[in-house]
Image (tube, rainbow, N blue to C red):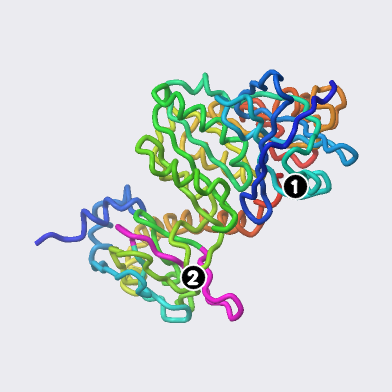
Amino acid sequence: MLPRLCAVRRMWEETHDTFTMELEGPAGAAPTPFAPGQFCMLYVYGVGEIPISISGDPARPEVLVHTTRVVGTVTRALRALKPGSVLGVRGPFGTAWPLEEAVGSDVVLVAGGIGLAPLRPALCQILARRERYGKVVLLYGARSPQDILYRREIERWRAKLDLDVYVTVDRASTSWRGSVGVVTTLIPRAPFDPTSTVALVCGPEVMMRFTVHELLARGVREDAIHVSLERNMKCAIGLCGHCQYGPMFICKDGPVFAYSAIRPLFGKREI
Amino acid sequence: MQTLEPVIAAHPFFVGLKPEHVEIVTGCASNVRFDPGEFIFREGDPADRFYLLRQGTVALEINTPDRGPIVVQTLTAGDVLGWSWLVPPYRWRFDGRAIDLVRATALDGKCLRKKCEEDHDLGYDLMQRIAYVMEQRLQAARLQLLDLKDVRS
């Protein structure tokens, strides 16, 4: 698959080490419809190609939005791009959050750190069709108050009467008035009915394992818990084998999986 | 006169406790409130009580010479605050400070330890409850230590 050319429309810092960029195709190009949870391969010419989750609103497919953290060569090169810079884009790829399956149920979204980015499109879509769901709860854990992603948007979400938003940080100075503790500590008393809840979980893998444990302890069914996995990806279409996960490929069969489908593999050191 | 029995029986920490044990525990209980910013206990002080939080938020803080006080955890209504009363040398390991108006039921640690010695069924039940809370906090502390938010890009 050949990458198509896209230009950086806007770019801004979210926190000291994360940024969001908006990409657009050439004038007259068809928009890029995507499903919440999918990712694209972004190619910085002469540097490399990496998978990045889509974090935009699915209702606005004309703009491709990605939020990422500066962690390596390619993300550093991405951060250095300017409005008008051109990069290669392949995708969208992968499976989506099961928002149809969640219709009629409560939905709890549990995000850790930058894991909020792949969940943002899901929340945008849920809020656009709010009447289709029961209670909607966002539980978000960041490392510190300065590391909170989409801060202004979270404040807007928090003001909504039909959305419960809980934010916690791992540590803080005494000037922080909010919750301190890991995101899993929010689960036991979050306002959702575990017998009729679909959980969408995204964050570092160990955080997701602890989260799954808490959700199960709360009574959420295994097949109602969905996690987004991450591995080194190259082709993104299930051919190269870089992201093999047992009998599956993260790029093609994931990144979103029902926990019940991957339980024997989840957290296995050898996988 | 209204006693604290129903309040204690309804607190998540004591849900399911036998009525006769609720009565015993109530004998060691008192109502307390703390104003915003007030220290509930200070690191190193004798830990002679623990608290069933009913309203407000408490920050557990530790003071560092270079960065000042750091909040390591916050606890809210429904949580139990403190277990240093149970383990020698019965001294607080952190500062506990009310973030906003806090209303709680305080339980006298010495009184409760004595009651547990006299009634081992109560002691076992209480230990199970405290052990659960400690396990939850230990797991959370481990996750916090891993500093995982860095890993995903």
Q: Secondary structure at mark 1?
A: helix
What is the x, y in percent for residue A270? 80, 39
Residue found 61% across the figure and 49% down from its top = A14
Name the subunit of mark 2: B
Residue found 57% across the figure and 30% down from its top = A57
Kind of residue at badge 2? Glu
Name the residue tied to disc 2. Answer: B61
Foreground of the two, A238 or A247: A238
Name the subunit of mark 1: A
Q: Quarter holding the C terminus of chain A?
A: top right
| Main secondary structure of the magenta stretch | strand
Q: Residue reaching furthest right?
A: A46
> Are discs 2 and 1 located on one and the same chain?
no
Kind of residue at badge 1? Arg
Q: Residues within 10 Å of mark 2 (few under 14, many from 20)?
A: many
Residue A45 is marked as none
The verdict on residue B86 being magenta is: no
Residue found 47% across the figure and 67% down from its top = A175
Q: Secondary structure at mark 2?
A: strand
The verdict on residue B59 being magenta is: yes
User: Vertically, is A18 above or below B107?
Assistant: above
What is the x, y in percent for residue B72? 52, 65
What is the x, y in percent for residue A207? 62, 46
Q: Quarter holding the N terminus of chain A?
A: top right
Name the residue tied to disc 1. Answer: A79
Can residue B145 be seen by looking at this rendering?
yes
Foreground of the two, A124 or B69: A124
Horizontally, residue A169 falls left or right of residue A69, namely: left
Which quarter of the picture shows residue B125? Answer: bottom left
